[in-house]
Image (spheres, grey):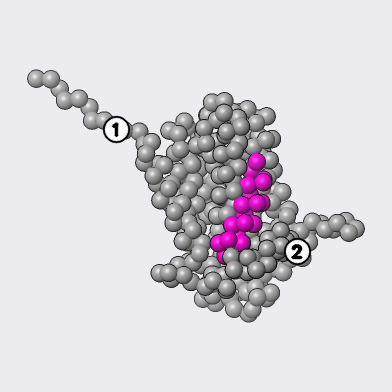
C-alpha cells in the first residue's frame, strides 16, 4: 500500500507571511484560466473576443468562485451550523468550499459581465467552459496535498490504495486523484477538442455541464461522503445529487440547439 506523503500545508513561508498549498492551487487555476483564455481568444473560434477581455472576465470569475464556493458550502452542507454562527461564514481560512456553489457564483458573475458588455449569457459561458477544467484539476491537487476529501475504504491489494495517516490507518481510494484525472484532465481534453469548431449557442456550456456532472457522479462512488451528512436518498451523496441537475440542464442545452439533419429530398417521378 502507498502512504500519503503528509505534505506541510504551508507551501511558501517568508517571515510572518505563509502561502498555503490550497491558496497556491487557486492562484495556479486563475493563471491557467488567463493563459488559456488569451489563447482561445486568438483562435477566433467565437466572434468578438479579444485577449484584453480576459482581465475583466477573470476578476468577475474570481469573485464568483470565492463568494459562491463559500456560500454554497455553508448552505448546501452545513446550513444549521452557519445559521447559528453567521460570522464564521467569512472565515474562509478555516476551509470549506463547494464546487456547485462556486459554479452558481460564476454563473451569476458571468450574467453580470454579459449585461455589462452587451454579450449573450450563453455566449460568455460557451467561451469560458473549456477554460475551467484545468482549474478544477489544480483544486483537486490541493485537496490531495491537504489529505482532505479522502476516498472510501479500498481493497488492500489495490496497487494504488493509499493510507492517509492524518485520518486513520485504513487503505483508501485516492479519490482526489480520480477527480483530478476525470473532472480535470479528461474533461479539459474533451471540451477543448469539442470547442475547436464553431458550435450552436449553448452547446459548449451543455457539454461542460454533462461532462462534469457524469464524472463527478462516477468519482463520488469512490469518495467518502462527508461525515456530518453521510449518504442521502438512494444511497447517493450530496455531490451526486447536486450534479444530477447539471446533467439534465446540460443535455437540454445540447439538444435544444442541435443541428437538424434533414433527409435528402426524394427524387421526382
How far from the left and from the top, in percent, is residue 102? 59, 52
Residue furthest out toward the bottom = 169
Residue furthest out toward the right = 15
Residue 141 belongs to magenta span:
no
Quarter of the image with the C terminus in it: top left
Which residue carries the number 1 mark? Answer: 261
Q: Residue at x 64, y 65 (%)?
A: 82
Q: Secondary structure at mark 2?
A: loop
Viewer-proximal residue, 154 or 148? Answer: 148
Residue 73, quarter of picture: bottom right
Q: Residue at x 31, y 33 (%)?
A: 260
Which residue carries the number 2 mark? Answer: 9
Q: Is residue 75 visible?
A: yes
Q: Secondary structure at mark 1?
A: loop
Please indicate whether residue 159 sits to the left or right of residue 251 in the image: right
Badge 2 or badge 1: first in the primary sequence: 2
Label 1 packing within 10 angstroms: few (<14), some (14-19), many (20+): few
Vertical arrangement, residue 92 with respect to residue 224, above or below: above
How far from the left and from the top, in percent, is residue 206? 45, 43
The secondary structure that most of the magenta stretch takes on is helix
Viewer-proximal residue, 30 or 71? Answer: 71
Please indicate whether residue 199 sits to the left or right of residue 174 in the image: left
Viewer-proximal residue, 112 or 230? Answer: 112
Q: Which residues are magenta?
A: 60-77
How far from the left and from the top, in percent, is residue 107? 56, 44
How far from the left and from the top, in percent, is residue 55? 69, 35
Label 2 packing within 10 angstroms: few (<14), some (14-19), many (20+): some
Amino acid at each position: 500500500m502507498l502512504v500519503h506523503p503528509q505534505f506541510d500545508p504551508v507551501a511558501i513561508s517568508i517571515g510572518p507571511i505563509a502561502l498555503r498549498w490550497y491558496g497556491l492551487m487557486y492562484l495556479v487555476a486563475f493563471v491557467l484560466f488567463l493563459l488559456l483564455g488569451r489563447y482561445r481568444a486568438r483562435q477566433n473560434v467565437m466572434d468578438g473576443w479579444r485577449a484584453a477581455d480576459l482581465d475583466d472576465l477573470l476578476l468577475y470569475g474570481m469573485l464568483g468562485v470565492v463568494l459562491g464556493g463559500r456560500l454554497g458550502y455553508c448552505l448546501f452542507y452545513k446550513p444549521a451550523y452557519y445559521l447559528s454562527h453567521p460570522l464564521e461564514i467569512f472565515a474562509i481560512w478555516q476551509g470549506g468550499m463547494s464546487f456547485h456553489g462556486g459554479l452558481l457564483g460564476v454563473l451569476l458573475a458571468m450574467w453580470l459581465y454579459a449585461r455589462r458588455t452587451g454579450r449573450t449569457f450563453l455566449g460568455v459561458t460557451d467561451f469560458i467552459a473549456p477554460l475551467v477544467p484545468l482549474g478544477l484539476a489544480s483544486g483537486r491537487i490541493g485537496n490531495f496535498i491537504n489529505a482532505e476529501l479522502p476516498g472510501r475504504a479500498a481493497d488492500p491489494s489495490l496497487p494504488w490504495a493509499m493510507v492517509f495517516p492524518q485520518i486513520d490507518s485504513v487503505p483508501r481510494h485516492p479519490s482526489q486523484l480520480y477527480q483530478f484525472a476525470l473532472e480535470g484532465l479528461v474533461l479539459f481534453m474533451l471540451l477543448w477538442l469539442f470547442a475547436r469548431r464553431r458550435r450552436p449557442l449553448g452547446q459548449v456550456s451543455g457539454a461542460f455541464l454533462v461532462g462534469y456532472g457524469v464524472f463527478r457522479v462516477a468519482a463520488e462512488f469512490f469518495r467518502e461522503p462527508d461525515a456530518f451528512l453521510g449518504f442521502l436518498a438512494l444511497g447517493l451523496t450530496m455531490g451526486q445529487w447536486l450534479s444530477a441537475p447539471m446533467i439534465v440542464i446540460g443535455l437540454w442545452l445540447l439538444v435544444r440547439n442541435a443541428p437538424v439533419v434533414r433527409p435528402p429530398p426524394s427524387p421526382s417521378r
